[in-house]
Image (spheres, grey):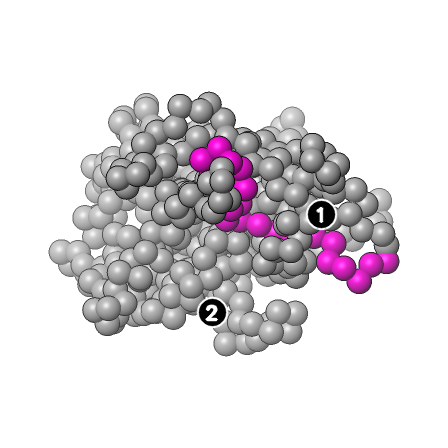
Amino acid sequence: MSVQVELKPDWARVRFNSVEPSAEPTFADFHYFWLRHNCLCLNGCRHTATKERLIDAAVVPLEIRPLRASVETSSTDGTPAVSLVWAPIPTKDDTGKLVVSDEKEHVSLFPVEWLRENAYSFEREYSHELPPHDTALVTIDYSRYVQENGSLSEIDSVQYKAALFDKLQKYGVAVIRNRGDSTEDIIYDFIDPSADVIPTHFGRIEHLRTGNTENTNNDQLGYTNSAVRLHTDLCYAEEVPGFQFLHCIRPADVGGENYFVHAESAANYLKTEVNSRAYELLTTVPVKFDRRQANFQAQLVSPILRLSDEIDPETNERKLAQVRYSYFTQGAQTKVPFSQLREWYEAQQVWDKLLYRDDFQLKAELQAGDVVIYDNFKVLHARNGFSGPRHMAGVYLNSADLWEHLGAAKARAGSLEASA
């Protein structure tokens, strides 16, 4: 295999020359900030005479990414080298002040043998990809299942629900276009008629709009036109509903777009690709979630990332069981010693930065009749601020009811297709 370099979102993978089978490691992963800090060039990164390092680690942005990469042949000895091209970064002058370089691009050339000798992560066994961020992957067009007379045949109905099962199992969220006007009818897309929705202190169905008069305890952000940042719902409740769906009755005149992050994938990415210490703090430090309204109050203490009690036999670690994340109901942090509080806040900020990356988010602009359903244990949801009379109906569902109903439909779809 020839030398190859693969640019990932936060690190590079270098595949070394190898003859199969080989006892030598075949690849290694390198953080971009490590590569930029260890640039070997004599154009500001190493002293021209002594070859000592000049670049200070403090000036290298941790979020730095190369503009492009290639494998070149060294002009000195003809061996392969990895070339990385960067945008310029500020450097420190002789007085310690940051100065902006006048170079348009900066080139780092790493001999492959140097990378092999200095590698710190050979053949990582566990790594995670980005969360899903292509909305097309989670979208279902209900109209393609509907016959000309507006009805669904049995096979159309179970195929639609089988598609829902697959989307929710794989991605934790599904966007359903052109579903219709009746929220009550839509409920039974997801659960049996013998089951029912989960009512909360807001009511059976929430009408998320300004000027709300249908619901109780409507003194909360959801009933305003303000932006609501990424969160899971009812973090302060002992029993949290497993799923919620939003039915668009009327979109906003301007704004109000929804966006989602598969938080389970984001947490795994944080753990293996970005900052394992931040993950550790988010899974161990207790947080008080405190919902205070004029006529309702509830509290619960839990880590933001709650791990299961069972050990995953594949990784010998506890898997993520539930995400509780809600900035607007998070109480004052009183469980962390003074000397560790800054570290705790830094962990939250690392996590939050990941969640607001474009390559972590699924974005959906819902029109009247559209529906979005998501796993409230694994998926964060949010909306942009808006103007105009936006109206969403929100409904909570029990996970067991949903999986039983959709699972039966998927099994029925399989048997009908097999007998066709």
Q: Where residue 80 appears, x then y in whole percent?
A: 72, 39
Q: Which mark is residue 307?
A: 2
Location of residue 411 by image quarter: bottom right
Crowd rating for badge 1 (residues with CA inside 10 Å; few <14, some 14–19, many 20+): many
Q: Which residue is mark 1?
A: 15
Drawn side of residue 90 relative to residue 85, left or right:
left
Residue drawn at 72 percent across, 34 percent down:
73
Residue drawn at 75 percent across, 36 percent down:
78
Q: Was residue 380 drawn as part of the magenta stretch in this picture? A: no
Badge 2 amino acid: Leu
Q: Where residue 292 appears, x then y in whole percent?
A: 18, 59
Crowd rating for badge 2 (residues with CA inside 10 Å; few <14, some 14–19, many 20+): some
- Residue 122 at least partly seen: yes
SS label for mark 2: strand
Badge 1 amino acid: Arg
Q: Was residue 42 drawn as part of the magenta stretch in this picture? A: yes
Q: Indicate the quadrant containing the N terminus: top left, top right, bottom left or bottom right.
A: top right
* Residue 338 vertical position relative to residue 19 in the rendered view, above or below: below
Q: Which residues are magenta?
A: 21-45
Q: Where residue 48 appears, x then y in whole percent?
A: 49, 37
Distance between the Cα atoms at labels 2 and 1?
34 Å
Q: Indicate the quadrant containing the C terminus: top left, top right, bottom left or bottom right.
A: top right
Q: Which mark is residue 33?
A: none
Q: Nearer the viewer, residue 292 or 30?
A: 30
